[in-house]
Image (cartoon, grey):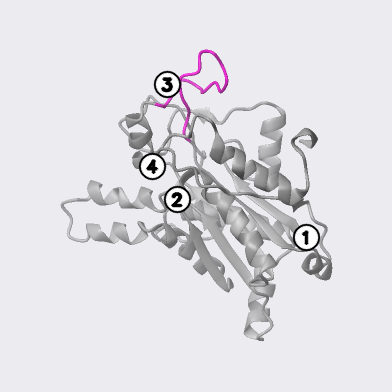
Amino acid sequence: MNIAVTGEGIISAIGFNKQEVLQSLTTKQSGIGMMKHLQSVHRELPVGEVDLSNEQMKEMAGIPVSQMMSRTALMGIIAVRQALTDAGISVDDILARKKKGESLRIALVSGTTVGGMDITELCFDHIEEDDNVSFLQHHDCGSCTNTMADYFGFFTEVTTLSTACSSAANAIMFGARLLKDHQADIVIAGGTESLSRFHLNGFNSLMILDHERCRPFDATRAGLNLGEGAAFVVLESDETANERGVKPHAYLTGYGNACDAFHQTASSEDGEGAYLAMKEALDMAHLSPKEI
């Protein structure tokens, strides 16, 4: 089975949709800057922040401003909406078909590291209030995915994966497997994550955050910059895409995963885990390293 990518959606520090992101990339625009929305004691640290408030994103998605929702779920909703539109999938049409019992099996697979931690942290800001535990209901990683699924109302399967930085990549791989195992007709897969104090405090304790823009591979490199955003793709078989009359943007021909148990936060010096994962992806796609 050929896995086609028929829709793409993204919101990030360098653009609120894929056209803006591409424009920023081709014109070498950086999204790294000082914090505007996240409240942290480490405000001197540069981050890649989506320059929209939660209220602005709720307005974009048609969500009541008074409704409590994690920033992670909000960005995910916006990115999924874009991906569905890009793939020519109408939410109203799917819901109408669902009422008639004709709905497609559409799965949502979302990757995230800490889910609604941004809401959980508000519990401590209201520690003396009796109802402060209400902030904890969004803590579970799956809560964000469920919130996204409830917003759209037509997903037949909802899955959350949390494997740190590889969460979204694993979500896409899992989505492809759902299609190949005929467990779904269409899969929306990707990841979403908002910045939180937990992120900054954790990475700062590891002493790997740069106080300037990061400089990968540079002799003066001093660490990384944290960021936030969401990106999702629509995956479906060639057959389903042809039936819907849509032209794929690309094909997912190979992917790989490997377990590197060298250290809790560090990769092995010989790169064995990364090598095995890349080799698996190349082998599946029938490619050699020289062809990359």
Which of discs 1 and 3 lies nearer the camera? The answer is 1
Q: In which quarter of the image is residue 135?
A: bottom left
The disc at residue 20 is: none
Residue occupied by mark 2 = 71
Task: Give me the C-alpha separation between circle 4 and circle 1.
Answer: 38 Å
Q: Is residue 42 visible?
A: no
| Residue 175 in the image, given as x and y percentages of width and height | 62, 61
What's under tag 4, amino acid-wise? Answer: Ser
Q: Residue at (45%, 59%) from the top-left corner?
A: 144
CB of mark 3 within 8 Å of CB of mark 4? no
CB of mark 1 within 8 Å of CB of mark 3? no
| Residue 27 in the image, given as x and y percentages of width and height | 70, 27
What's under tag 1, amino acid-wise? Answer: Asn
What's under tag 2, amino acid-wise? Answer: Arg
Please state, as top left, top right, bottom left or bottom right, where the N terminus lies in the image: bottom right
The disc at residue 196 is: 4
The disc at residue 211 is: 3
Task: Give me the C-alpha separation between circle 2 and circle 4.
Answer: 10 Å
Mark 4: which secondary structure? Answer: loop
